[in-house]
Amino acid sequence: MKRLFLFFTIVFSTLIIVSCSEIREDLPQAPEITLHKSGFSTPGSSDFHGKLIANSNWDMKQCQQCHASNYNGGTAQASCYDCHKLPGGPEACNTCHGDFVNPLKQAPPRALNGAISSSERGVGAHSKHLSDNIMGVAVECTECHTMPNGFSDPIHIDNTLGAEVVFGDFAKLNTNIPSGFSYDASLGDFNPNPSFNFEAGSCSNTYCHGYFKNGNTNNVVLFTAQSEGSACGTCHGDPTTGNPMPKTPAEGGTHPPNANCVTCHLDEVSINGGVYSITDKSKHINGKLNIFGDEETY
Ligand code: HEC
Ligand code: HEC
Ligand code: HEC
Ligand code: HEC
Ligand code: HEC
Ligand code: HEC
């Protein structure tokens, strides 16, 4: 109510100033009066409009009251599109998370709180999974989140803290043995039941990080872990030595004990000075077992 009163006061005083200046052109300039606080349009200011919106659980309905439900001006006659030029205006998917100037980048960094360091929870290993993947295939948002169907989808912004992590099919892949190889029933089936521990910020029981036959099924990985999450030996093999060899019969597994991966997993790995590396990331962590150049789908 106070705001509305202030608004009309501004409108009327402007009208008076305008009509007076038609008569007396030598009057001193009126000081600029604005409805919002002075830092409202200045990123970095504690009164910046983005901060105000964030502090009210990202409610933009309050702005739509004066700036119109489609944000293009309304009674305020100031359009959000003057600065938020992408389709959807301030509802564009890179406005609050991702890169404000790059509509193709909608995932953190930047996080909701502005963080860009991967040691921050809201940033974590997003880039490593989505675009800066070095040792396996890239994954989509849907492998870890249910995508909102537009900004106002009720599943998008809720009253619980932080984003919801809901796993897609990839983390749940049930790996078994490829055709032509013997199957040891005592090892059971591998039905990953992935979970995200919100308190700890960690993932467990995922196909991707070791829940498969002869893999390190107990592996728990922090979203903010840097190289520890992706070092050789963490998902399969020995985490202490970094040897990626999965469990052999001597360790209760079924993997052939011959050590040189290149012999059987062609084109995918290479060895240099005793250290293995992935040469073709499209064949690794891709939901398929790559043996002798064949790609088996489970
Ligand atoms: C004068 C230019 C300008 C206008 C007009 C403008 N914005 Fe913004 N807005 C910005 C800039 C610049 C940023 C990004 C600042 C940054 O990178 O931190 C931003 C960021 C935001 C954010 C993201 C906040 C965050 O912390 O991530 C929201 C939400 C937003 N604006 C909503 C609106 C709405 C709603 C309107 C219209 C009622 C509007 N803006 C009008 C310039 C503007
Ligand atoms: C009570 C009506 C009203 C509400 C509510 C309101 N605005 Fe405004 N807004 C205005 C008016 C009128 C102007 C133009 C005069 C001025 O700059 O104060 C304006 C101007 C602005 C500008 C500056 C535009 C420019 O080109 O520099 C921004 C940014 C802005 N509003 C964002 C917002 C955001 C974000 C919200 C919601 C948090 C919001 N407004 C809520 C009435 C309102
Ligand atoms: C490998 C899994 C994974 C993928 C893929 C992924 N995310 Fe996330 N995302 C997470 C995790 C884990 C969090 C952190 C949850 C927490 O701790 O609050 C998160 C948090 C977020 C947040 C909240 C950030 C914050 O500041 O709190 C947003 C927004 C988000 N993700 C958007 C996306 C979008 C958009 C994509 C696709 C372009 C995507 N994510 C892909 C796992 C993922
Ligand atoms: C005004 C700010 C804002 C805009 C614009 C925005 N988001 Fe979000 N987004 C959030 C916030 C806040 C969260 C985390 C909040 C939560 O889960 O309660 C979030 C979380 C997410 C997540 C993580 C999963 C989840 O729902 O928690 C995804 C994915 C996502 N947004 C996609 C999108 C897409 C797609 C768009 C464009 C249609 C979009 N966002 C536009 C603020 C925004
Ligand atoms: C003699 C051929 C051979 C060599 C050498 C070999 N592998 Fe395998 N690899 C296989 C076969 C066969 C399977 C399928 C085993 C099964 O399902 O029981 C397999 C499966 C795997 C799997 C999936 C998990 C599993 O056991 O089913 C991983 C991971 C793997 N190998 C990694 C390696 C690494 C790392 C090396 C090198 C240190 C290596 N392999 C060397 C033949 C080989
Ligand atoms: C983030 C977890 C993770 C890490 C780290 C990892 N792997 Fe794997 N690796 C997998 C998964 C998942 C499979 C597929 C297992 C399956 O489908 O049964 C796999 C399979 C393999 C295979 C078998 C061929 C194939 O792709 O099907 C080889 C060889 C292999 N990895 C080598 C390595 C080497 C060498 C390193 C270190 C440079 C490494 N891995 C690090 C997750 C990982």
Image (cartoon, grey):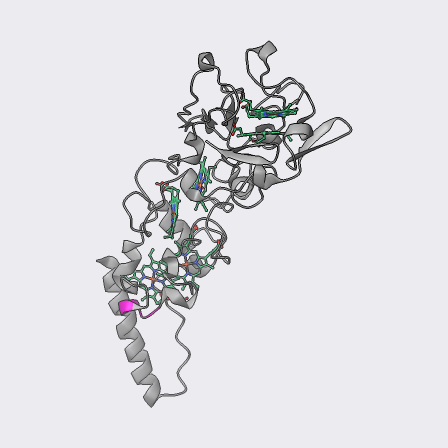
Quadrant of the rendered image containing residue 143: top left
Quadrant of the image containing the N terminus: bottom left
In the foreground, 198 or 41: 198
The number of discs equals 0
Q: Residue at x 28, y 68 (%)?
A: 74
- Residue closest to the eye, 121 or 274: 274
Question: Front-most of 78 and 297?
Answer: 297
Relative height, residue 288 to residue 83 (above, below): above
Left/right of residue 63 with respect to residue 292 in the rendered view: left
Q: Is 14 located above or below residue 243 in the figure?
A: below
List x then y, in percent, for residue 166: 37, 35
Is residue 296 covered in magenta? no
What residue do we see at 56% from left, 40% from top?
128
User: What's drawn in magenta, residue-wise?
Assistant: 74-78
Q: Quadrant of ligand 2?
A: bottom left
**Farthest residue in the bottom direction?**
23
Point out the image quarter for the C terminus.
top left
Considering every residue shown, the one lying at the far front of the view is 180
Q: Main secondary structure of the magenta part?
A: helix
Relative image position of residue 69 (x, y in whole percent): 27, 62
Q: Is residue 41 above or below residue 255?
A: below
Q: What's the residue at 28%, 55% (across, down)?
A: 62
**Relative horizontal placement of residue 181, taking residue 144 as reference (left or right):** right
Residue located 44% across and 22% down the image: 190
